[in-house]
Amino acid sequence: MVAVSVLYFARARDLAGVAEERLDLPAALDHAELRARLGAAHPRLAGLLPSCRFAVDEEIVPPGTLALKDGSCLALIPPVSGG
């Protein structure tokens, strides 16, 4: 397990009820496992998670396995809309 900072933006922040938190996560996990863990921690966020992207240390991570290290910054990026 590694300690990471998780950042929530826009609607994700509203649903999670926090802008940032520290979580202990496995050093390697896939997007589905991460979504399950975040959804369990923040049930109101669960419906938005399938459409969110992830960034690790300011780099968008394509679907697959996330590689985390102690002190990583994981950003949850919800869909963007506007007009």
Image (tube, rainbow, N blue to C red):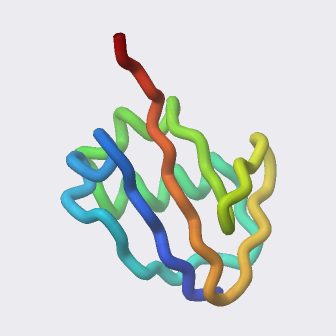
**Image mark count:** 0
Residue depicted at 58% across the width and 72% down the height: 73
Q: Position of residue 4 (x, y in %)?
A: 55, 80
Quadrant of the drawing holding the C terminus: top left
Q: Position of residue 57 (x, y in %)?
A: 67, 68
Classify residue 80 by image quadrant.
top left
Residue depicted at 66% across the width and 77% down the height: 26
Q: Position of residue 7 (x, y in %)?
A: 44, 63
In the rendered view, tell whether residue 22 sits above or below residue 34.
below
Q: Nearer the viewer, residue 30 or 75?
A: 75
Q: Nearer the viewer, residue 64 or 79?
A: 79
Classify residue 78 by image quadrant.
top left
Residue depicted at 33% across the width and 63% down the height: 41
Q: Position of residue 6 (x, y in %)?
A: 47, 68
Position of 52 with respect to 26 (left or right) is: left
Position of 71 with respect to 49 (left or right) is: right
View extreme (front): residue: 83
In the rendered view, tell whether residue 38 sits above or below residue 6.
above
Q: Nearer the viewer, residue 59 or 41?
A: 59
In the rendered view, tell whether residue 21 sits above or below residue 14.
below
Quadrant of the drawing holding the N terminus: bottom right
View extreme (top): residue: 83
Position of 74 with respect to 36 (left or right) is: right
Residue depicted at 35% across the width and 70% down the height: 20
